[in-house]
Image (tube, rainbow, N blue to C red):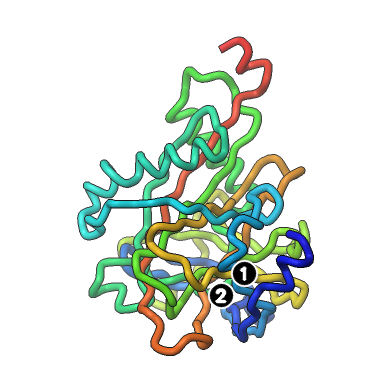
Amino acid sequence: MNATALARARTIDAKIGYLHRSSKINRRFCAPHEDVNTSEYIECPVHMQDGSGLEDQFQLDVHGFMFVHSPNTFTAWNDPERIAADYEPVQLEIVRRILGADRMVNLGHALRTAGNSVEKAMKPVASEAHVDFESRAAQAYAKSLYAEHHPDAPPYERFVAFSFWRPLTPPAHDWPLALCDFRSLAPDEGKRNVLVWCDEIPPKETWFDPIEGEDAFPAAYIFDHNPAHRWWYFSRMTPQDALLLKFHDSDHSRAWRCAHSAFRNTADDQPTERESIEFRGMAFFDAPSAGAKA
């Protein structure tokens, strides 16, 4: 991004949830309509800038995210089967074209709300700085997905785990999504946060009990506060727009992850209660020699 464009960006007061130094065992229990973190977080003031009006300045391989104007006519958000059949395949192809990937795997969607998640049958917003895939977990997951979905395909050289995030409500949002510029994130930052899927959140007194096989569980990155982090959000983002962000890119010569978080919007009066859909997938790229033989 050039200096002139940066100078035009509006800066607002904002806080992001960062890991508290007291946290020792980091787990995220995920039930159908509720997520609970065992980690302790503290809200810290951050350098938050508004990317609206500068959308074309953000590059996926530089910043870790990009803004996509993505017209959408689908509205059956209360019908999971129709989302899977009609919405997800379209988004998968949009992302495939953007990335130029050879093969894709659909990882489904999550509907989120800043309101009553149980009443709306949605997940709550995630209000702490995180990346959904930790490197070791991402590598293992990509390998297993490729073997399952593309068993006869040539070997892949690179994979990208991604989110294609779309608001379902008009701006301004009460809990917008913020994204951290990859260049402000040090390569060794991030602590492992284990993901534990469950039908119901277990009793609090059991949260720190040993879990057999935990080392092989999916895991995310969570972060300590770092004043060097540079955060962006888009105040005028509509349901006809989307954000493509990287959970993990196996090619670390590019921006390979994007820390992100929802944050409370105090800059706008009477903002809309945010609802959103996050579509996830994995993109695979053939090795040049494999592509030539295929």
Q: How many marks?
A: 2
Mark 2, residue position? 39
Answer with the quarter of the image where residue 191 lies: bottom right
* Residue 39, percent from left and from top: 56, 75
* Tag 2 secondary structure: loop
Please report the residue visible at 31 percent of the width from the left and 63 percent of the height from the top. Answer: 32
Q: Residues within 10 Å of mark 2 (few under 14, many from 20)?
A: some
Q: Is residue 190 above or below residue 127?
A: above
Q: Nearer the viewer, mark 2 or mark 1?
A: 1
Q: Nearer the viewer, residue 58 or 258?
A: 58
* Residue 120, percent from left and from top: 25, 71
User: Along the polypeptide, which appears first: circle 2 or circle 1?
Assistant: 2
Please report the residue visible at 64 percent of the width from the left and 78 percent of the height from the top. Answer: 10
Q: Residues within 10 Å of mark 1 (few under 14, many from 20)?
A: many
- Quarter of the rendering occupied by the N terminus: bottom right
**Residue 213 visible in rendering:** no
Report the Cα–Cα distance between label 2 and label 1.
24 Å
Residue type highlighted by circle 1: Trp
* Residue 178, percent from left and from top: 56, 69
**Residue 143 visible in rendering:** yes
Q: Nearer the viewer, residue 108 or 197?
A: 108
Residue type highlighted by circle 2: Ser
- Quarter of the rendering occupied by the C terminus: top right
Please report the residue visible at 44 percent of the width from the left and 77 percent of the height from the top. Answer: 172
Mark 1, residue position? 232
Please report the residue visible at 50 percent of the width from the left and 29 percent of the height from the top. Answer: 103
Q: Is residue 195 left or right of residue 3?
A: left
* Tag 1 secondary structure: strand
Q: Is residue 5 above or below residue 107?
A: below
Q: Is residue 233 above or below residue 86?
A: below
